[in-house]
């Protein structure tokens, strides 16, 4: 350790789960942060060195921040608006019309603020978003201090922010330009699905992503009806359709991937397509069970996501890990599939690989970004501790996260948000709800 300047943050007297090859587990140690990066970590007491801020972690655990690899942040505002419905009804009669009526710049801004507050509170430090007015999602996320990708949505038909795909393309280009100086929030291109984007539009999105070197996100093979619809329309299954259009040729982030054949899984592995698993959304919308153990066995990179709040209905990745592990066990009638270690990796380094950020985040290592969360283990449901990984997946929830550091900045301390005005955000939610309910009531007499 060099003596030239003080550390910005020292976390000490703490258990550390670095999730790196070098340091599997430190029972009692310390971690030093300077600027946005982890400077060093080690066993025992820290070497004597001045630190501007000290965080004592007695009976706590420091670990990498979780990575939510797929969500639609502003949809927090639709939380609980329409549940227990078939996906087609849910989408076509509730979500699409609701989006058409209510989604505007303010909606996206406040919805993303709410989402960031919820994510920070539950230990998520990086997210990958896909929605409309993503400049506003980016604005909110930058205020929160979170790290993430904001994917501007694009479809064949008019969307809340664009009367035509051409206008969406224009928005994407503006977003890429506006975020060119930002380290924390980066742009992405988000064609919604294979069945809501024409072959030409999909190819245009691919070349746009390649031209600017930004990630391409898509929902892929989420439901059986999607596969049937694409077969009917193009004579190919969705994965085959994308291969035929050249979309699998360079990194693609494919969300869901529930309905896959053996050949499609082989192809996804060969093309190095990155997959995001969203177990709670797949369960709630009864979409099916993604063959994640088979994808992992083929070496496919898999991350974990919550999907939008309307189909989950929260952004707590600790709960998502629990669901991911249990879903595959009951589905295969085999308690040995998806062990806690595998699931925890999906929510950390796996997610980092999905987003192409594995050199920066996903584990606690000197030289990586300081995205660190501190969990309070001194709670009845987390004692005794035989196996930390087991606790993180099967016992902990986001509410156990005490402190959150992102890019070397403390954004939550002792469960108090430091970057966001939580009171103001929560107060705004009353107005949002009243506004939405009022419009539903106005509309219902004509509709019924
Ligand atoms: Zn989604």
Image (cartoon, rainbow, N blue to C red):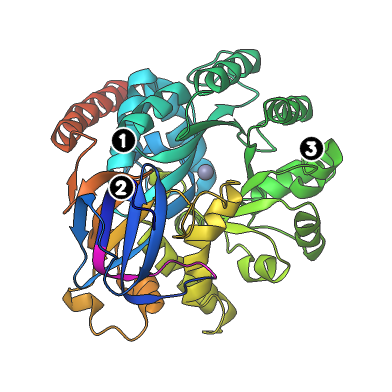
Classify residue 229 as left or right of residue 367.
right
What residue sits 33% from the left and 56% below the top?
A: 32
The residue at 51%/65% (across/down) is: 345
Residue 444 is a magenta residue: no
- Relative placement, left or right, of 443 versus 129 is left
Quarter where residue 10 is shown: bottom left
The mark total stands at: 3
Toward the viewer: 349 or 235?
349
Secondary element under disc 1, as helix, strand or loop, is helix
How crowded is the residue under tag 1: few (<14 C-alpha within 10 Å), some, or many (20+)? many
Q: In this picture, which residue range is highlighted in magenta? A: 12-21
The percent position of residue 271, horizontal first and vertical second, equals: 79, 51
- Contact check, label 1 and label 2, Cβ < 8 Å: yes
Q: Which mark is residue 120?
A: 2
Sequence-first disc among 1 and 3? 1
- For label 2, the SS is helix
Residue topped by disc 1: 144
Residue 365, how many percent across, how many down? 47, 59
Side of 380 relative to 201 (left or right)? left
Q: Give the image location of residue 152, x and y in percent.
A: 54, 27
Indicate yes or no whether the magenta region holds residue 20. Answer: yes
Residue 241 position (above or below residue 176): below
Using a 10 Å C-alpha cutoff, classify the residue at mark 2 as few (fewer than 14 neighbours), some (14 to 19) or many (20 or more).
Answer: many
Q: Which residue is mark 3?
A: 233
Cβ of mark 1 under 8 Å from ligand 1: the answer is no
Rendered view: 168 above or below 420: above
Looking at the rendered image, the quarter that the C terminus falls into is top left
Please report whichever mark, 3 or 2, sits nearer to the chain's N-terminal start. 2
Q: Nearer the viewer, mark 3 or mark 2?
A: 2
Identify the residue at horizontal 47%, vertical 26% (top origin).
134
Eye-nearest disc, 1 or 3: 1
């Amino acid at each position: 350790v060099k003596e030239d300047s003080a550390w910005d943050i020292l976390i000490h007297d703490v258990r550390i789960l670095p999730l790196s090859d070098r340091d599997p587990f430190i029972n009692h140690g310390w971690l030093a942060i300077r600027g946005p990066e982890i400077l060093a970590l080690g066993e025992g007491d820290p070497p004597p060195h001045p630190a501007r801020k000290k965080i004592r972690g007695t009976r706590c655990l420091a670990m990498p921040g979780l990575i939510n690899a797929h969500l639609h942040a502003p949809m927090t505002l639709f939380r609980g608006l329409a549940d227990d419905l078939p996906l087609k009804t849910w989408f076509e009669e509730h979500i699409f019309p609701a989006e058409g009526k209510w989604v505007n710049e303010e909606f996206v801004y406040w919805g993303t603020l709410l989402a960031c507050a919820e994510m920070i509170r539950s230990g998520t430090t990086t997210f990958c978003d896909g929605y409309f007015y993503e400049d506003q999602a980016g604005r909110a996320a930058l205020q929160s201090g979170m790290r993430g990708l904001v994917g501007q949505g694009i479809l064949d038909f008019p969307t809340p922010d664009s009367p035509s795909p051409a206008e969406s393309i224009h928005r994407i280009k503006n977003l890429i330009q506006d975020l060119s100086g930002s380290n924390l929030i980066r742009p992405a291109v988000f064609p919604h699905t294979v069945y809501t984007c024409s072959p030409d539009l999909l190819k245009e999105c691919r070349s746009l992503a390649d031209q600017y070197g930004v990630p391409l996100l898509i929902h892929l093979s989420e439901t059986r009806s999607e596969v049937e619809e694409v077969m009917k329309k193009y004579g190919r299954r969705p994965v085959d359709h994308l291969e035929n259009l050249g979309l699998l040729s360079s990194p693609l982030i494919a969300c869901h991937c529930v309905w896959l054949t053996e050949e499609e899984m082989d192809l996804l592995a060969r093309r190095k397509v990155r997959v995001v698993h969203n177990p709670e959304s797949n369960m709630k919308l009864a979409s099916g069970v993604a063959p994640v153990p088979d994808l992992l066995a083929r070496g496919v990179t898999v991350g974990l996501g919550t999907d939008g709040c309307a189909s989950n209905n929260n952004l707590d990745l600790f709960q998502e890990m629990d669901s991911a592990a249990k879903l595959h066990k009951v589905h295969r009638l085999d308690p040995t599939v998806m062990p806690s270690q595998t699931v925890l990796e999906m929510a950390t380094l796996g997610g980092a690989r999905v987003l192409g950020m594995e050199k920066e985040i996903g584990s606690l290592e000197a030289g990586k970004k300081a995205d660190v969360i501190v969990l309070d283990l001194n709670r009845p449901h987390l004692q005794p501790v035989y196996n930390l990984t087991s606790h993180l997946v099967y016992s902990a929830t986001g509410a156990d996260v005490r402190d959150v550091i992102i890019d070397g900045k403390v954004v939550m301390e002792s469960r108090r948000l430091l970057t966001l005005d939580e009171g103001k955000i929560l107060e705004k939610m009353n107005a949002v709800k009243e506004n939405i309910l009022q419009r539903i009531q106005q509309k219902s007499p004509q509709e019924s």
